[in-house]
Amino acid sequence: MGSFEGIAFVLLLSLVLPSARSFYLPGVAPRDFQRGAELQVKVNKLSSTKTQLPYDYYFLEYCKPKNIVNSAENLGEVLRGDRIENSLYIFKMMIDEACTVICRHNFTADGVKNFKEKIDDEYRVNMILDNLPVAVSKQRRDGSQSPSYEHGFRVGYKDIQVAGTKDEKYYINNHLSFTVKYHKDTESEDARIVGFEVTPSSVHHEYNDWDEKNPRLLTCNAKAKVSPGNHAPQEVTSDYIVFTYDVTFQASDVKWASRWDTYLLMSDDQIHWFSIINSLMIVLFLSGMVAMIMMRTLYRDIANYNQLETQDEAQEETGWKLVHGDVFRPPVNSGLLCVYVGTGVQFFGMALVTMIFALLGFLSPSNRGGLMTAMVLLWVFMGLFAGFASARLHKMFKGTEWKKITLKTAFMFPGIVFAIFFVLNALIWGEKSSGAVPFGTMFALVLLWFGISVPLVFVGSYLGFKKPAIEHPVKTNKIPRQIPEQAWYMQPAFSILIEAYSHLVQCSLSCSSS
């Protein structure tokens, strides 16, 4: 049994026999921790739904370890702007900690400015523990008992009305109260992490004399945790700011396989459901209306053809029979149509295989960046089908310059996208965002394009052009039928304006609803 057949056989056994011993996909296997084991919290990017520009965690002047180590990143993580790095937040498994001091930092003028800008833009801090992103629990607006969750915690907040004035004061969330939920089997003492939550708060820590080796605070100690709301908030200033955290471990009945279910209850308001439903309704309504008109026309033409059996042939040329000799005539820009069809087949194949992999569980959310990596690689390998489809269509149009069509299929659409991507990446790089793709990754994308996609497009075109041409079901008239002059409202310029107006109305409705 070959390797591929062996993997398929194991997958089939795992589906048919749930009790059979199976395997875990790479990167999603559970980890067991003993009591007192070290847990390293990693920091991810700073993200916001207001600007869509991610930033590195250490772009702000947070407490830094001596050596910043980047975790192993795949292509998808780099393209998404994920920068997973180590931090000073280190826990001990099932050992609670209170008022642990991370550092005392003196912000520079640029640091204060960056913090205020990120607070204005509602940026959130993303952290990871055992490959599980941190979540903030909050009560639902409808008053139900089950809590909802948000991705990450806010950098800080601002108070506009201070003592009746219009001064704006910015406060930083410098104290974090972590809650780590774990699940322990009765047969073993080891435990698995099934939840990672945080409650941020702004606390103006007080102290008498600062000792770097053994700092002691007046606002909290190792026996008393910080109670949110009972202390004065910490303003973003150039003075010394103390960063602290608490951690509490809680036993949970949630099993490791279901630990990602919490993130299905996220309420970040990033999905514009009204816009999606509105678009679907418009598409379904228009498609149904066009289908109804076409079906009524076809039924009427078929009925007329059946009634005209005894009449002369001149009267039979009505309805759809008027254009049956012209529908398969090659268009003016047949080469461009072949390129578009080939590119569409490439994207359709990529989307289809990606959805199949997702249904089979290969694209787990714990495999960070796996979806983006799979889409890029599948698009590259689908170049074979793109070249095959474009060459077959070109030969059906009685074309002979298949090499020219192949070059356009391989370079036209990817070249336009890469040029736009390069310009946008330069602008993002100028903003010092972590979303900017490094030069090495850019070179890897070009290498995938020229080294794999382009040769596969040529191979597919060669195989497609060797096949016999597709025969039309009807013959094409040598003299094209004259197209009647269209009304003024059927002109392309007017149609484009109507389409743009409909999209503008749809966008305004979705924005007002959100």
Image: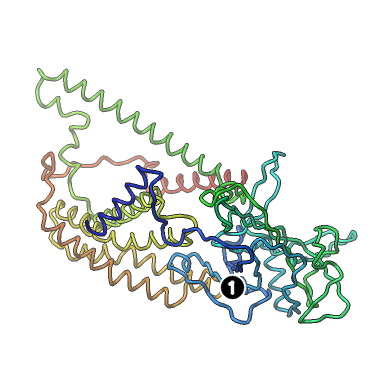
Which residue corresponds to mark 1?
A: 86
Q: Residue 354: x percent and y percent?
A: 37, 53
The residue positioned 86% from the left and 75% from the top of the image is: 207
The image shows residue 241, relative to residue 15, as above or below, that is below
Hey, which quadrant is residue 6 in on the image?
bottom left
The residue positioned 74% from the left and 69% from the top of the image is: 100
Quadrant where the N terminus lies?
Answer: bottom left
Q: Residue 202: x percent and y percent?
A: 78, 64
Left or right: residue 505 versus residue 442 is right
The residue positioned 68% from the left and 72% from the top of the image is: 114
Q: Residue 437: x percent and y percent?
A: 47, 72
At numbered mark 1, what does the secondary structure look like: helix, strand or loop? strand
Q: Residues within 10 Å of mark 1 (few under 14, many from 20)?
A: many
Given the current orientation, which residue lies at the most extreme right position?
Answer: 163
Given the current orientation, which residue lies at the most extreme front position?
Answer: 187
**Viewer-closest of 357 and 213:** 213
Q: Name the residue type under label 1.
A: Asn
**Viewer-closest of 69 and 233:** 69
Q: Residue 57: x percent and y percent?
A: 61, 70
Q: How many marks?
A: 1
The image shows residue 169, relative to residue 356, as above or below, that is below
Left or right: residue 138 versus residue 86 is right
Hey, which quadrant is residue 343 in on the image?
bottom left
**Viewer-closest of 8 and 399:** 8
Left or right: residue 152 versus residue 455 is right
Left or right: residue 212 versus residue 460 is right
The residue positioned 55% from the left and 69% from the top of the image is: 84
- The image's colouring method is rainbow
Hey, which quadrant is residue 321 in on the image?
top left
